[in-house]
Amino acid sequence: MTAEERIDAFSRFLTAQGYLLLDGGLATEIEARGAKLDSELWSAAVLVDQPEIIYKVHQDYLAAGADCIASVSYQATVEGLVALGMSEASAHAVLRSSVELALEARDDFWSEKINRAGRLRPLVAASIGPYGAYLADGSEYRGDYGLSEDQLFEFHRARWETLCSAGADLVACETIPCRDEVRALRKLIELESSPPAWISFSCQDSLRLADGASLVETVAELRDTPNLVAIGVNCVPPGLVGDLVATLRTRWDKPIVVYPNSGESWDAVRKCWVDGHGEADPFVDALEWYQKGARILGGCCRTGPDDIRRLRGVLTQNRSPGIN
C-alpha cells in the first residue's frame, strides 16, 4: 500500500468507531508464558528463540479487541543483534521477522473470522524504541544519552529502513525521552519511503520530556511533519495521562495517542518493576483521557489482554465517531 492508503486505513478507525485501540504490554505477557527476559535484548531475544510465544501474545491481544498490534522490535537493533554474534544480514532478517510475525498473527486472526463481528481489519505497527532501549540501562526514562541529533539519526536509520520495508501499516516511535531524538526521528518520518508514524514521548511530568525539554515546544516543531499521524505519550504512570493530554492538545490538533504503564517504576539495575504503585485498573480514568482528546489508546508495561478488553468496553460505550 502507499502511504496515503495506509493513512486512510488508520483514519477509518477514528471515523467509524471514534477511537483506535492498541495492544498492551508485550514483555509482560511473554514473560507470563514462561519466556526469560534477562537478555539485554529483552523481548527481542524471544523473537529469535521462541517466536511461537510472541505469535500467541499477538493473537490474544487481537481477540481482546486490539485494533493495532506492535511488533516485538522495541529493543531490537542491528548493533545489539550483532553484539550477540549475528551477521548484519542476519540481524536485519530478525528485524523483518518481527513485523512479519505480527502480520501473520493479524492475517490469521482475520481469516478465522473469530471475534471480529463489527470490527475493522486490525493494523500492525513496527515498534521503534529509543536509543536508551538499546543501552538497556533505563535511560529511555532519562534521555541522558550525550549523543547529537545526527548521531541519533544514524543509529535509527538502519533498522528504520528494514522495518519500514517489511510491510507494517504504521511505525510506532515509542518512549522517546529527548528532543534531539525526536528531531532525528522526524527526519526519518519525512523520508518518502516511510509509512505513516506516530511519536510517543517519555515524560517526567505534564510539561516536560524525560530529559527536561519543554513538551509544548517539542510538539510545536512537529506540527507540519508529513506522515506524522499522531503524537502522544507511553510508559508513563496513568495518573499523569490526563494532564499530558491537555498539554498536548494546546499545540496539536491531530490524533493523540496514550498508552500508560501500570503505575510502577522500572529498576534498571535489578531489571524489574518496583514500588508497588501498580493500579488495580490502569484505565480507570480512560474516559477522561478520551474526553480531553485522546483517540488512540492502549497499554504499556504491566498491562495485559484483560486490561485491553475492559478498555475496549469503556471506549465502545462512550465513542464519538468522526472526532479526531
Image: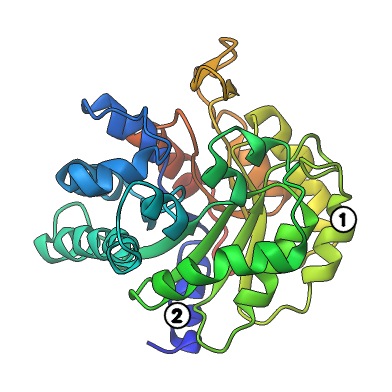
Q: Residue furthest top?
A: 276
Tell me where residue 171 appears, x and y as whole percent: 49, 66
The image's mark for residue 254 is none
Residue 245 is situated, as x and y percent measured from the top left of the image, at 74, 47
Q: Amino acid at mark 1?
A: Val
- Residue 90: image location, x then y, percent: 27, 63
Residue 107, located in which quarter of the rendered image?
bottom left
* Residue 133 in the figure: left or right of residue 60: right
Q: Tell me, yes or no, if residue 183 can be seen here.
A: no
What label sits on residue 6 in the rendered view?
2
Ranked by sequence position, the earlier of labels 1 and 2 is 2
Instruction: Find residue 156 and report its horizontal and vertical position in percent.
Output: 56, 64
Return the residue nearer the eye: 207 or 83: 83
Q: Give me the residue at 52% from left, 60% from top.
A: 172
Residue wearing tag 1: 216
Discs 1, 2 touching: Cβ within 8 Å:
no
Looking at the image, is 30 positioned above or below residue 134? above
